[in-house]
Image (tube, rainbow, N blue to C red):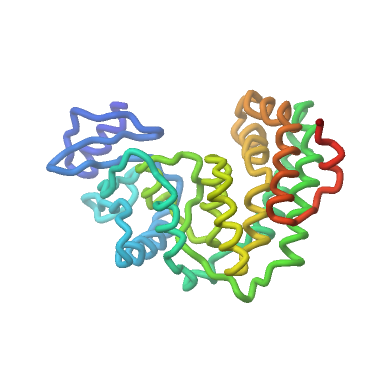
Amino acid sequence: MKDILNKLKEYYGLDVQDYECYKDGITFFVNGNYYLFTKCLFEEEYLNDILELCNYVRSSGIKIHDFVYNKEYKLISDGYVLFKINVFIEEIDFDDILLFKRLDCSKYLKKYVFMDKFWEDKIDYLEIQLSELSDNKLLNNSFDYYVGIAEILILYLKNNYDKEKIKLCLSHRCLECLDTLEFYNPLNISVDLPYKDVATYLRRKKDVLLLTSMIDESLRDGNYGYFFARMVFPFKYFHEVEGILVDKKSNRELIEIVNNVDNYERYLFDMEKMFGIFLFEWVKDSIKP
């Protein structure tokens, strides 16, 4: 922690005494404002692109956190970035999700990678890592099953989604943490199709009435199939696999995912019925009464 405080003093002239730890950084209050000082894995050039997006977002009225330049007028300070926090609320709700969903970001389409291409490349990468590095029996015995589900969904998107009519909105890289700091953190924002964040939120909240409403909306705006794919794709499994293969993470959460495969198949079956999209023929027979 002393190293982080030294960086603040060296690069920003801030002598911070009172702070709270937050993930890979700290939050603190000084000169009438709250700040987040956090680790950043991106290059300065990429942050300049993010800054351009942030300026557009702010012009639309969404108060994401502000980048703070250091004394050298750079965004990165020895691997860290400073933000002035503009929004503090106790809990992110669906209205916050819709605020991002309604912002048209289609002008950033040239830099967008559609879900099918992204996950084809990601799975290919994980397969290489698995073949070269893994002697993990749990991973080896479960990988093909989840890849099979992913490939079915990827093929479905390729055959059923009209990429000529893509409309992008403001989204998030990761929405696992529904707190203010992460939701409005410029390092966590991106552009994507309107139902990425919606699906992540609904998978966590399990609000059937809200899901039904959004299914009807996705039918009207042409994102129905994509919404279904986002609701059932085994993202968490592949996230854990990558953590094990690349970051040497423990097996603990992967064990829980694999042990609950029956619940996942029931979930697949329920989603198929709600959307009226039936892709996994074996699921109905595998559901235990």
253 over 85 or under it: above or below = above
- Residue 250: x and y in percent read 62, 25
Q: Which residue is drawn at 29% across and 45% down?
A: 82
- Residue 78: x and y in percent read 35, 42
Considering every residue shown, the one lying at the far left of the view is: 31
- Residue 60: x and y in percent read 33, 66
- Residue 282 vs residue 233: left or right? right
22 over 41 or under it: above or below = above
Q: Which residue is drawn at 47% across and 73% down?
A: 107
Q: Residue at x 73, y 26 (%)?
A: 259
For residue 55, what is the image quadrant? bottom left
For residue 289, what is the image quadrant? top right
Considering every residue shown, the one lying at the far bottom of the view is: 164
Q: Nearer the viewer, residue 34 or 125?
A: 34
Residue 79 shows in the view: no
Residue 186 shows in the view: yes
Q: Which of 17 and 106 is in front in this view?
A: 106
Q: Nearer the viewer, residue 219 or 96?
A: 219
Q: Which residue is drawn at 39% across and 55% down?
A: 44
Q: How many numbered marks have been drawn onto this rendered protein structure? A: 0
Q: In which quarter of the image is the N terminus?
A: top left
- Residue 130: x and y in percent read 75, 38
For residue 248, what is the image quadrant? top right
- Residue 218 vs residue 171: left or right? right
279 over 267 or under it: above or below = below
